[in-house]
Amino acid sequence: MRKRAAALCGAAVVMAGTFTAVPAEASAPGTANTVQPPKLTWKSCATDKYPTLQCASLQVPLDHSRPHGEKITLALSRVPHTARTYQGPLLVNPGGPGGSGLTLAGFVASSLPAEVAAQYDVIGFDPRGVGKSKPALDCGPGRFAPVRPDSLPATPAIEKANLDRARSFAAACGRKYGHLLPYINTTSAVRDMDAIRQALGAKKINYFGYSYGTYLGAVYARFFPEQVRRLVLDSVVDPTDVWYEANLNQDLAFNDRHRAFLAWVAENDATYGLGTDPERIEATWYAMRAALARKPAGGTVGASELEDTFIPGGYYNGYWPSLAEAFAAYVNHKDSEPLVEAYENFGAVDASGDNGYSIYTSVQCRDAHWPRDWRQWREDNWAVYDKAPFMTWNNAWYNAPCAFWPTDSLRPVNVANGKLPPALLFQATGDAATPYEGAVTAHRLLARSSLVVEEGGGNHGVTLSGNACLDEHLAAYLTDGTVPRGHGEADAVCEALPAPDPAAAAAKAARASLKGSALHGLLGFRH
């Protein structure tokens, strides 16, 4: 990261790439305003962890250009303000697309300094089609049930098996939700957000989004700049390469992050006994993968499930000790039980995950153009695989339904914005899910924004995760709008938290790690 540190303090980088035009509806966002917003009825939905959490529901048009047409229902949550000083609603979103935000409201309200949280109504919401919103989409229940075909299409038969799965999933979405799919997209979701604003009776909103939630927030700000009061974006999507190119870029970054994990395993050879040479440990990991492709562990963890299990380690290094223990047990002791347990903890997909994946594909496949010729996917992914084998084909099949999606595509939104108040962006330099360069691009596009960088960090979702330096910038901004101002591509730099200590992690004694685990359990994976 030494080269990165030099760049942070140096001259501004040149922004690469071109933008497509803003969709026509972006210049005319307003039909939702023609209908009087309904009033929200809040009821307690308290949990032991979040005793002041309240819930409500809101009906919105399926098609915002037809405000009197079919309605759908959004599920909302709230932790109400308690201070005399009231700064309005703070909408929060965990990303995805497809992530539920109901519990995130409780987490954010309890994780911010009490005197800051008390000044806001922290508002969570399940975006259209997600979770407790109705209807909630589930195109293919049990799609990720083990054991799936090997993700690596080493033979025509394996490639065909995976292609058949992708086609059938897209077809099932079309059969079950054909009339809904044209309206499951980012632009419809931001209109929902403005409907939430109106139902709350607020002239402006504050917004705090993670991962895909940063793109959601940036698009909202593009459509409704006068309704934005404060805007926090953590782990920032590159708004210029949604979504096909973004996934190829992720593959390269996740490979680097996986190698960082293997290097950490090498540094902790005294604990894991897998050697001190990261390259040899990497070869051992791929040998484990090959063995599992032949004989899945516990009849459950094949090659694809192994990848599913270790991909979360690219999002959050607090999972590294558990993953390393499972890796070591399988290799050193022929014990597959810890690997099966790790899969159940990190890789297995339940009904909420099936719902999340249905929305993930629905939004990404609709938001932007995807190649319809599988030959391009094959060529591009083999080229990336040669450089980055860890996640490339697993990720390709995850997104492959977009090659066969039953709706046409919209054009990505140009989020360039000179009308906003200062926004605050947070980014780790080694983030794999939303690589660093995307945050720099968004910083340039959002005039007067400030970028706070976690130098040397690799986690995805970095605020409210144990780094006091980052959280101080967040608290200052939410208190009175204060943003840092620097001269390089970053306006402020915070040191990353140290890598996890295997002994402390095993004892669950690392306070920051526990806090990070709470956040990352809410953010989920595959942003």
Image: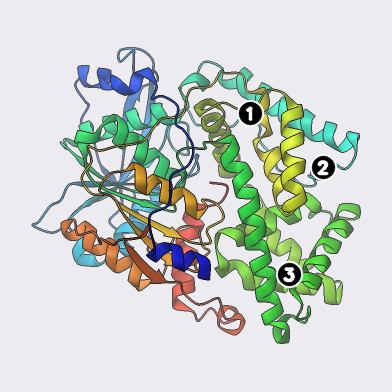
Q: Crowdedness of circle 2 by 10 Å Cα count: few (<14), some, many (20+)?
A: some
- Which residue shows up at 72% across the image and 30% down it? 376
Query: Which residue is denoted by mark 3 in the rendering?
Result: 326
Q: Crowdedness of circle 1 by 10 Å Cα count: few (<14), some, many (20+)?
A: many
Classify 134 as above or below 11: above
Classify 9 as above or below 96: below
Query: Which residue is denoted by mark 1 in the rendering?
Result: 402
Classify 197 as above or below 515: above
On screen, residue 214 versus residue 482, left or right, reads right
Amino acid tagged 3: Ala
- Which residue shows up at 52% across the image and 28% down it? 368
**Disc assigned to residue 149:** 2
Q: Real-space Cα distance between discs 3 and 1?
A: 34 Å
Where residue 302 sits in the image (x, y, percent)? 81, 53
* Along the viewing direction, whichever of 214 and 3 lies nearer the viewer: 3
On screen, residue 488 versus residue 143, left or right, reads left
